[in-house]
């Protein structure tokens, strides 16, 4: 049924204007992805603000195309200059660059393109199959469950974007939630934490904070570092050989599935998906010693994994309004800005939207394949542009995008302040993704917590009563305390009898 | 950043987090209560909970950094001199100053002029290219952006 709906939407969207728009947007996304310092998140944030006044359908198709294009585009710089264009392509460097150094740059680009397309296709399938199911399940969620769900989103995002020091991820997430409390609150209309600044009555807009923490921080960082890159410009035949793809069939499917499932987990994102897919490919390879020295399997695994993750990350965006990755968080914000209400209500208000969205995703993936295989050499020249020329231009676009939302100079200052805050945050190991996620989900947490308490006359018990709530509470607890010694020992004790029985059976 | 430096950074961050959380918790407490809705529905309640969590996390961070001797922060003349002469710090300061300067003049001078000056200064300071190519790039970029957004896309510009 889902596939038929998808096919219908694909046919509906088939018109020259859409095709040209998608091709141009994917091209732009690839440029964003391949330029080190410009990330997919930044690209979507920037284009969200620039396309804010456009018709919703056109704006969303552009943002999806930018997302798909940017995640793929990062592989170009990873292969040719050993610098991942976006963090999602870090694993691609491991084998892509050694392949390019040994004269197989074209083969690496071709394989990366094809595996990215196949990864996207697996992601698309997941989007069509899982999003409606998850969305229907989410219809049962009440204030209590929604409160725990959003809290879980922020907690796991903090945990996974700062794996070496999760506390910093949680601090960033809570800071994001608290930022969302600034301004007039929804129930009694009291202006919180405005300190007499009138402009703060409406709270912090998502775009200036986003552009500040992602865009301006990148710009400052790149201008501080200067230009350090050597580009391998000689490429030959890019179109991959069929046998290479067939030989890696299992690897592609496995990496795709890994990418999808990691994408579905809120806030984790493409970086982890590509590394996990790479790791699995290495473990199951007949030649693990070749990994890191130019292994085709490694390259295919990381590129399939990160692109499949895009589709996976969009599943919770549409069904639960919880982003699966930082770029998906921005896309979620964009959907809201355009008047769409992703989450449980989307199934009621706009039941066909998931398929329309998936059809846009399909066109973006197809455009990525076409452009990725056909336009290679002219795009490589962009890699030669110096940061000192590129970054000021990007800053101009950040300024326009930030200003365009509300037409207030105040927003530009908000962007700069968050850029200034975001720079040391990055240097000291505080990830930006939970901050943004917290800012987006904060109002949901606030409203659901207070509404729930008003409904129960201040009784906290219903927050722990339903099965879904209990599952979510356990999930939040394990996310926050799962690594502590006490919890680990408790788990060991809990599983002791099972291990004992297993041992007995084995003997 | 190595572990020693990170511990020091954590120590400073934790102090900032703790002081800030305490200040904001006080702000939550003095918010109006709206007792007809019930105490649990007061606007200050959710921020109070989350600032309290932030405070706890700040304390955990402080405790950890103290264990790692992050409190041993010495500001010597030598350190300050090294910081002053650091190329990265200078580049950062210049880049940020230009951003602030540009934003300050936005809306006061025409977009194309101020943007061209901003791009030209950036390329000149960070040695992007020779001056006349720089001049052409700055003018062309600012004008193209203005034309694209203001005239074609009808986006309001500052």
Image: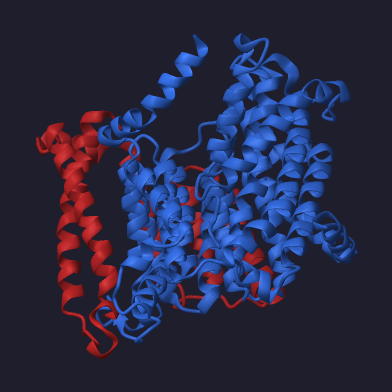
Chain colours: A blue, B red
Quadrant in the picture for residue B81: top left
Count up the numbered dots: 0
Q: Nearer the viewer, residue A477 or A202?
A: A477
Q: Residue at x 65, y 52 (%)?
A: A67
**Residue A192 coordinates in the image, percent (x, y):** 29, 78
**Residue B114 coordinates in the image, percent (x, y):** 49, 68
Q: Residue at x 36, y 25 (%)?
A: A496
Q: Quadrant of the N terminus of chain B?
A: top left
Q: Is residue B149 visible?
A: yes
Identify whether A348 is placed above or below A138. Answer: below
Identify whether B137 is placed above or below A224. Answer: below
Q: Is residue A106 visible?
A: no
Q: Is residue B66 left or right of residue A50?
A: left
Q: Is residue A86 left or right of residue A485?
A: right
Quadrant in the picture for residue A198: bottom left
Q: Is residue A489 left or right of residue B23?
A: right
**Residue A118 coordinates in the image, percent (x, y):** 77, 38
Q: Is residue A420 left or right of residue A82?
A: left
**Residue A478 coordinates in the image, percent (x, y):** 37, 43
Q: Residue at x 84, y 39 (%)?
A: A374
Q: Residue at x 51, y 79 (%)?
A: A407
């Amino acid at each position: 049924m889902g596939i038929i709906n998808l096919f219908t939407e694909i046919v509906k969207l088939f018109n020259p204007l859409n095709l040209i728009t998608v091709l141009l947007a994917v091209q732009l996304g690839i440029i964003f992805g391949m330029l080190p310092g410009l990330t997919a998140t930044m690209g979507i944030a920037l284009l969200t603000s620039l396309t804010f006044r456009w018709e919703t359908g056109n704006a969303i198709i552009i943002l999806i195309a930018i997302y798909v294009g940017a995640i793929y585009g990062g592989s170009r710089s990873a292969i040719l200059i050993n610098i991942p264009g976006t963090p999602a392509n870090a694993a691609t460097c491991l084998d892509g660059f050694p392949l390019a150094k040994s004269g197989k740059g074209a083969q690496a680009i071709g394989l990366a393109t094809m595996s990215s397309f196949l990864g996207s296709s697996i992601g698309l399938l997941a989007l069509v199959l899982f999003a409606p199911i998850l969305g229907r399940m989410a219809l049962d969620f009440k204030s209590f469950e929604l409160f725990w769900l959003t809290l879980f989103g922020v907690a796991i995002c903090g945990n996974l974007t700062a794996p070496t020091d999760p506390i910093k991820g949680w601090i960033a997430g809570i800071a994001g939630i608290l930022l969302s409390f600034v301004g007039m609150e929804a129930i009694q209309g009291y202006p919180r934490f405005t300190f007499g600044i009138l402009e703060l009555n409406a709270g912090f807009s998502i775009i200036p904070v986003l552009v500040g923490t992602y865009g301006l921080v990148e710009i400052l960082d790149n201008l501080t570092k200067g230009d350090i890159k050597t580009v391998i410009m000689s490429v030959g035949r890019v179109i991959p050989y069929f046998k290479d793809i067939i030989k890696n069939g299992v690897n592609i499917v496995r990496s795709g599935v890994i990418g999808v499932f990691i994408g579905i987990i809120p806030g984790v994102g493409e970086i982890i998906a590509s590394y996990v897919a790479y790791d699995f490919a290495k473990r199951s390879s007949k030649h693990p010693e070749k990994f890191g020295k130019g292994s085709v399997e490694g390259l295919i695994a990381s590129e399939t994994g990160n692109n499949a993750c895009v589709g996976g990350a969009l599943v919770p965006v549409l069904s639960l309004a919880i982003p699966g990755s930082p770029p998906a968080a921005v896309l979620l914000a964009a959907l809201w800005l355009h008047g769409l209400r992703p989450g449980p209500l989307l199934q009621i208000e706009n039941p066909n939207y998931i398929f329309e969205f998936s059809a846009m995703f399909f066109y973006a993936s197809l455009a990525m394949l076409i452009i990725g295989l056909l336009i290679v050499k002219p795009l490589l020249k962009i890699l030669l542009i110096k940061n000192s020329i590129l970054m000021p231009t990007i800053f101009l676009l950040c300024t326009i995008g930030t200003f365009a939302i509300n037409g207030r100079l105040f927003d530009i200052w908000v962007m700069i302040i968050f850029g200034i805050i975001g720079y040391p945050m990055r240097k000291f190991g505080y990830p930006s993704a939970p901050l943004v996620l917290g800012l987006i989900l904060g109002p949901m947490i606030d409203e659901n917590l207070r509404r729930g308490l008003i409904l129960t006359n201040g009784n906290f018990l219903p927050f722990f009563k339903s099965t879904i709530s209990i599952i979510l509470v356990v999930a939040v607890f394990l996310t926050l305390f799962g690594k502590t010694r006490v919890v680990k020992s408790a788990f060991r004790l809990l599983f002791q009898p099972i291990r004992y029985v297993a041992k007995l059976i084995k003997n | 950043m190595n572990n020693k430096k990170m511990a020091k950074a954590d120590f400073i961050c934790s102090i900032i987090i703790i002081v800030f959380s305490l200040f904001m918790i006080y702000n939550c407490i003095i918010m109006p209560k709206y007792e007809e809705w019930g105490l649990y529905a007061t606007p200050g309640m959710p921020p109070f909970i989350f600032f309290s969590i932030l405070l706890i996390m700040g304390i955990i961070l402080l405790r950890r950094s103290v264990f790692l001797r992050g409190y041993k922060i010495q500001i010597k003349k030598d350190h300050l001199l090294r910081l002053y002469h650091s190329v990265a710090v200078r580049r950062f300061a210049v880049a940020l100053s230009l951003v602030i300067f540009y934003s300050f003049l936005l809306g006061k001078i025409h977009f194309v002029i101020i943007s061209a000056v901003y791009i030209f200064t950036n390329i000149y300071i960070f040695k992007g290219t020779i001056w006349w190519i720089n001049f052409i790039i700055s003018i062309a970029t600012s004008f193209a952006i203005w034309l694209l957004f203001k005239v074609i896309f009808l986006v309001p510009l500052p």
